[in-house]
Structures are given as C-alpha cells and as structure tokens.
Amino acid sequence: MTAASARAQDWAVPVVRGALALAATAAITFSQDHSPALGLLVFGIWAVAVGVVVGALSLRFVADRTTRAITLVAAIVTAVAGLLALTVPGGLPFFLTLVSAWAAITGFLELYLGLRGRGRDAGARDRLAAGVFTAVLAVLFVLLPPDSVTAVGFFGAYLAILGVYLVIGGLSQKWAGAPGRGETPAAGAATPGTEQS
C-alpha cells in the first residue's frame, strides 16, 4: 500500500474507534448497575477491543511513521489497561486509579500527536480533541469523590462525547478527501455544463 492510499484510508481509524466508544456507551447507558464491577468490565472490553483494532488499523492505514509508532504505543497501553481491568479484582479505588492512569498517558500522547500534526495532518484536529477529552477524564477521575455511580457515569459520558466526535471527524475527513470534492479540474478539461459546440 502506498503512502497516498494509506492516507486516503486514514479516516477509518477514528470512525472505528468512535463506533467502539458508542457501543460501550450503550452498555453503560442501558444498564441500571453503575457499580465499579460494571465500570471495570465495560472499560476492559472496550480498551482491549480499541487497543487491538486501532493498533491493527494504524499499522495498515496511518502513513506517517512517527504518528503510527505513537498510536501503536497508545494502543498497547490501552489494551494492557483493558486486560488489567478484566483480570485484576478490584473495586472503586482500582477503577479510578486504572482509568486515570490510562487517560493521563494516552491523553498526553494524543495531545502530542495533535499538536505535532497541525497544518499537515488531516486527523490532527481530531487527535487534539480526543487528547483533551481524555486528559479531562484523567483529571476528573483524580478529583472525583469516591462514588461509583458518578465515576461510571462520567466514563460513559466521556465515551459518548468521544464516540460522536470521532465518527463525525473521521467521516468528514473521508468526505473531504473523496474524488470530486475540493479538486479543481485539470487544465484544459471542460467543466460540466460549459462545453462548447
């Protein structure tokens, strides 16, 4: 796959990531149980899925080597955090600590990628916004009073905001790069409706 074709498919990474966040949001929203066990279960499944899928898609579709490498590091951190959530027994303090540590690390990495890619990467704005959302989640989980309903609710709200933003951003990126959009006709080519007989 050439760099140009990989760049043309780069929109798939945020769309898939956003769709996974929205699926996890639905699991929290439609559950009456907002216990730390549910928070760890949803975070764990979501994080493992995002880590594996985003890591694989990044290997295939992210053209810039530095962006791809940092995205892979974030994907590995996310998958490891998910595995910890699924395998280590813990209550509310563990949930708050795990999610805040994960959010601080991955939020920083995304903020860095967003700032680094400004003006030259179509996905930089989305990475920057995702980094801000994730960093805010880390701060909330550090400052949060120890209440499981609030913690799981904030995590669900984070997933909802992130999911909607990434799906819209990724589809906008796809449509902006679609043939016929934003392209000027080649020199000498007639614009439809202006042909002369």
Image (tube, helix red, strand yellow):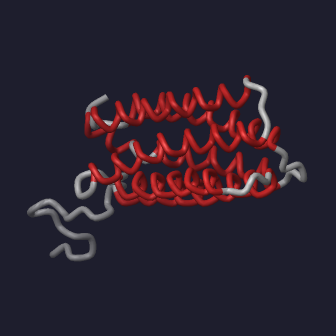
176 sits left or right of 42 in the view? left
183 sits left or right of 136 in the view? left
**Which one is in front, 138 or 32?**
138
- Choose top left, top right, bottom left or bottom right for residue 10: top left
Query: Residue 102 appears at what percent x and percent y?
Result: 55, 39
Residue at image location 27% in from the left, 56% down from the top: 118
In this rendering, is residue 78 above or below 140? above
The residue sitting at the top extreme is 87
Q: How many marks?
A: 0
**Which one is in front, 57 or 112?**
112
The residue sitting at the right extreme is 32
- Choose top left, top right, bottom left or bottom right for residue 150: bottom right
Residue at image location 36% in from the left, 60% down from the top: 176
34 sits left or right of 122 in the view? right
Which quarter shows the N terminus?
A: top left
Residue at image location 34% in from the left, 47% down from the top: 112
In this rendering, is residue 180 above or below 94? below
Query: Residue 52 appears at what percent x and percent y?
Result: 55, 28
The residue sitting at the left extreme is 188
- Choose top left, top right, bottom left or bottom right for residue 181: bottom left
**Which one is in front, 37 or 175?**
37
Query: Residue 71 appears at what percent x and percent y?
Result: 41, 36
Which quarter shows the C terminus?
A: bottom left
Residue at image location 34% in from the left, 45% down from the top: 8
Query: Residue 43 appears at what percent x and percent y?
Result: 69, 39
